[in-house]
Amino acid sequence: MTATVDVTVLADLLRRAAQAEILPRFRRLGGEDVRAKSEATDLVTEADEQAERMIKAEAARLWPGALFLGEESVAAEPALLTGLADVDLAIVVDPVDGTFNFASGIPAFGVMASVISGGKTIAGIIYDPMGDDWVMAEKGGGAWLRRPDGEAQRLRTAEPVALDQMVGMASTGYLPQDKRAEILGNLAKVRFLTNYRCAAHEYRTFAGGHVHYLMYNKLMPWDHLAGTLISQEAGAHAARLDGSPYLPHHLDGGLLVAPDKASWELLRREVFTV
């Protein structure tokens, strides 16, 4: 039990929403079921909206005192974001993370939720509808891969390696143009760079020990709160690019995640020179 939210119940709710509203629409979306928001690659689908509607309704029934903040709810009412700094209890949900992939028929998308108490993230869940499993963490309890049959596997980040051997993921699309060019040039110093266009799977990959860094510039809470906590509980050092802690109300300042503080400082100094 975390505060008044049982994370196993919340995890099951994400799974039920995926099975009821997301998977039946995968590779079956009609033209009227997909719409652009801020730009052509920023999409919302009928699956996003219906899944969030289901999760919100169930969350209100199960945890009536909690603030519910979903990506699509905030798109309709941006002022909801202001409540995260000092809220007693909040549930933050991304009903379909990786909507561009989902709408394109690419099976790399997820459902994410985090629990906020006193302005801090205390639990995070990333559900993979295609693999039917969760990566999840409660603060102080480690990070775990859990399956519906009860099997659980503890997750740990990768061992640190030299800069020229690091493999990782960076989202550079929201950087200022001049800094984007500089950082893309700096990334020649690492072994490999990739991007799934899906934070859910990027955080799962990192927490599972398969890559050595993640970097994001745009910080929407539904994209990063769950994954940052999970990464930290798997052993990572995570901070904004100025070195300050990443908190639920932060929307900018960048975010860098690495296996340990020394790797974080090396990447910040040599690569992510924002």
Image (cartoon, grey):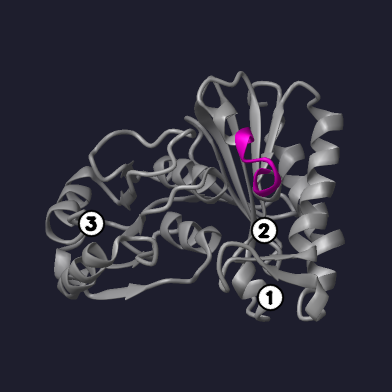
> What amino acid is found at the position of numbered circle 2 in the picture?
Asp
Which residue appears at 56% of the width and 72% of the height? 41
Q: Compared to 88, does 231 lie above or below?
A: below
Q: Which residue is mark 1?
A: 103
121 vs 36, left or right, is left
> What amino acid is found at the position of numbered circle 1 in the picture?
Ala
Label 3 or label 1, whichever lies nearer to me, is 1
Tell me, yes or no, whether the highlighted magenta stretch contains residue 191: no
**Contact, CB < 8 Å: mark 3 with mark 1?**
no
Quick one: label 2 or label 3, which is nearer the N terminus? 2
Residue 168, image x and y in percent? 33, 66
Spatial CA distance of label 2 from label 3 is: 27 Å
Residues drawn in magenta: 74-80
Spatial CA distance of label 1 from label 2 is: 21 Å
178 vs 27, left or right, is left
235 vs 74, left or right, is left
Residue 54, image x and y in percent? 84, 48
Quick one: label 3 or label 1, which is nearer the N terminus? 1
> What amino acid is found at the position of numbered circle 3 in the picture?
Pro
Q: Which mark is residue 20?
A: none
Q: Which residue is mark 2?
A: 133
Spatial CA distance of label 3 from label 1 is: 36 Å
Label 1 or label 2, whichever lies nearer to me, is 1
Q: Identify the secondary structure beneath mark 1.
A: helix
